[in-house]
């Protein structure tokens, strides 16, 4: 008789990104993804970036400039995709464990109807309430670098 493997059930956590710092949030999420957890981030446009907006936007414009537009590299301007790309930079996504971890991440703008009545958690270590300096939302940043909010 063959023994059947019992696969541990992965838990799904819904994280509300409102008022959380981008880098700290993504590092905590990346660690949890590598541990096998499924993570859903909602309110991606309300995530906070610390620093002066003019400086960050100027850096982004320089980074987004491309020599030949048809050839890339292509950089997203949508807040949900910026968050996904930030998390991707924190997992070893070229290795199999990183690929499987990265596939367990979902990021949404605002809160989809399917998650409105679900329990959402926040990550206290990533709270922007501790910030003393200037900061702005990912939505403001995305609009500055060319995100068409209506499309």
Image (spheres, rainbow, N blue to C red):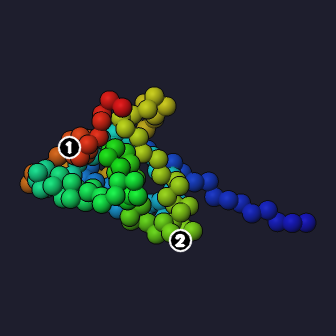
- Mark 2 lies on residue: 95
Position of residue 140 measured from the top left corner of the image (x, y, whole percent) = 21, 41
- Tell which of 112 and 85 is nearer to you: 85
Left or right position of 18 against 98:
left
Query: To which quarter of the image does residue 69 belong?
Result: bottom left
Q: Residue 71 or 59: which is nearer the viewer?
A: 71
Residue 51 sits above or below residue 116 on the image:
below
Query: What is the quadrant of the C terminus in the image?
Result: top left
Rendered image: mark on residue 113: none
Q: Which is closer to the viewer, label 2 or label 1?
A: 1
Q: Quadrant of the N terminus?
A: bottom right
Residue drawn at 26 percent across, 49 percent down? 20
On residue 144, the disc is 1
Instruction: Give the answer, above or below, for where 19 lies relative to 25.
Output: above
Asked whether the beta carbons under mark 2 and mark 1 sit within 8 Å of each other, the answer is no
- What is the number of callouts on the image? 2
Residue 92 as seen in the image, left or right of residue 23: right
> Which sits earlier in the primary sequence, circle 2 or circle 1?
2
Q: Residue at x 30, y 34 (%)?
A: 149
Q: Is residue 5 visible?
A: yes
Q: Indicate the secondary structure of the residue bearing disc 1.
A: helix
The residue lying toward the viewer, choosing from 102 and 114, is 102
- Is the residue marked by circle 1 packed among few (<14), some (14-19), or many (20+) residues within 10 Å? some
Whether residue 132 appears in this view of the structure is no
Image coordinates of residue 100 in percent, x first then y, are 56, 61
């Amino acid at each position: 008789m063959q023994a059947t493997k019992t696969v541990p059930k992965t838990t799904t956590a819904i994280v509300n990104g409102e008022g959380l710092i981008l880098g700290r949030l993504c590092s905590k999420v990346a660690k949890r993804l590598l541990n096998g957890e499924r993570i859903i981030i909602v309110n991606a446009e309300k995530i906070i970036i610390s620093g002066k907006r003019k400086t960050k936007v100027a850096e982004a414009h320089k980074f987004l400039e491309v020599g030949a537009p048809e050839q890339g590299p292509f950089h997203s301007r949508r807040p949900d995709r910026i968050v996904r790309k930030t998390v991707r930079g924190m997992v070893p996504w070229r290795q199999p464990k990183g690929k499987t971890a990265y596939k367990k991440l979902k990021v949404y703008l605002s809160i989809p109807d399917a998650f409105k009545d679900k329990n959402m958690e926040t990550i206290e270590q990533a709270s922007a309430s501790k910030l003393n300096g200037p900061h702005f939302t990912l939505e403001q940043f995305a609009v500055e670098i060319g995100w068409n909010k209506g499309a």
